[in-house]
Image (cartoon, rainbow, N blue to C red):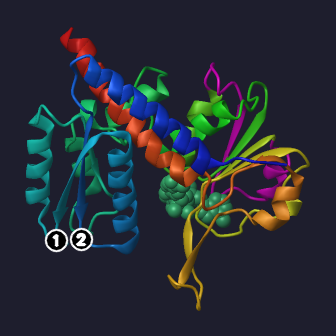
Amino acid sequence: MILIDGKQTAETIKAELALEVEHILKNGGKRPHLAAILVGNDGASETYIASKVKACKKVGFNSTLIRFPSDTSEEELLEEVLKINKDEDIDGLIVQLPLPKHISEKKVTETIVPEKDVDGFHPLNVGKLALNLPTFVSATPYGIMQLLERYRIETAGKHCVVIGRSNIVGSPVSILLSRNTYPGNCTVTLCHSRTPDIEKYTREADILVVALGKPGFVKANMVKQGVVVIDVGITRVEAPGTDKGYRIMGDVDFDEVAPKCSYITPVPGGVGPMTIVALLKNTLLSLSNKLSINH
Ligand code: NAP
């Protein structure tokens, strides 16, 4: 069994990005600039945003964090998005989800100009992904593709089973792995909460991508020997007596499943750190796109 080390891979990619930034600056270019908007003070969102800002600093990107209180109106938030859309210096904009209930996430996502939508959530970018056109691939699926690529995991002709069909993980992963490219060329089965007898599919999987948000859902009897397992799940589970009072668990029962795998991602330290570097890669891509338009 080979452990897919997302933390280490993310560090390697950060070092590559830092070199690219140096190269841009040497050639008279500007630092890539990511702006992030955080509404309210949800604990998990605070942690994610802090990691994104820290990662920007590490690779030499500029970052701007804009905070709004949880009672901010939708209009105020949209106004800020429109302002950033026009800001020439900002290459990428993310609005940390979830947003308070009185704000429409759909409206906010659709207001970000597609050229700065480094999360890849805008319908135009999702459409481009489905048509296999160049675009911002949303961060988590992009991170997963990078892991498969960097560990040189064979995907062509493999049966890939994805559990979960969300717009941010399961659905784009299923599209990406069925494309006629590498990583891709898989035969993909997409499972969800209405899939009966899910083990029937998971036992057939050469590659199993699990993104449903139910800790320890995948057990050893659900997978075949030699499977590649990508565990996307992140759930905070109460852990009395620990410093934080909780621990992070994946959707796969790692101890049971790992011995049967050819490759497996741990949680934490697997897909999570890759999501952040994918966002940085998209921000750099946004700057490069701008430069190629202006030249
Ligand atoms: P989501 O929007 O809640 O979607 C969950 C999906 O799982 C849905 O399609 C749902 O089916 C399906 N599902 C739920 N219960 C199921 C069951 N018993 N059997 C089969 N399918 C089931 O979740 P998400 O945003 O994709 O996130 C999934 C997990 O990944 C969460 O733990 C989240 O925290 C984590 N995540 C991690 C990262 C990262 O960076 N590592 C990034 C994003 C998300 P229906 O469509 O039928 O409801």
Q: Going by the image, does 236 lie left or right of 206? A: left
Name the quadrant containing residue 187.
top right
Residue 46 is situated, as x and y percent measured from the top left of the image, at: 34, 67
Residue type at tag 1: Pro
Residue 151 is situated, as x and y percent measured from the top left of the image, at: 70, 35
How packed is label 2: few (under 14 Cα within 10 Å), some, or many (20 or more)?
some
Q: Does the magenta stretch include residue 261?
A: no
Q: Which mark is residue 177?
A: none
Residue 96 is situated, as x and y percent measured from the top left of the image, at: 31, 57
Q: Is residue 189 magenta?
A: yes
Labels 2 & 1 near each other (Cβ < 8 A): yes
Q: Distance between the residues labelled 2 and 1?
A: 5 Å
Residue type at tag 2: Gly
Residue 115 seen in the current view: yes
Residue 285 seen in the current view: no
Mark 1 highlights which residue? 69
Above or below, comparing residue 25 to residue 271 in the picture:
above
Residue at 73% x, 29% y is 155
The segment highlighted magenta reads 179-205
Name the quadrant containing residue 59.
top left
Which of these two is toward me, 133 or 152?
A: 152
Tell which quarter ligand 1 is in. bottom right
Q: Residue 40 carries which label?
A: 2
Residue 231 is situated, as x and y percent measured from the top left of the image, at: 66, 54
Above or below, comparing residue 157 to residue 220 in the picture:
above
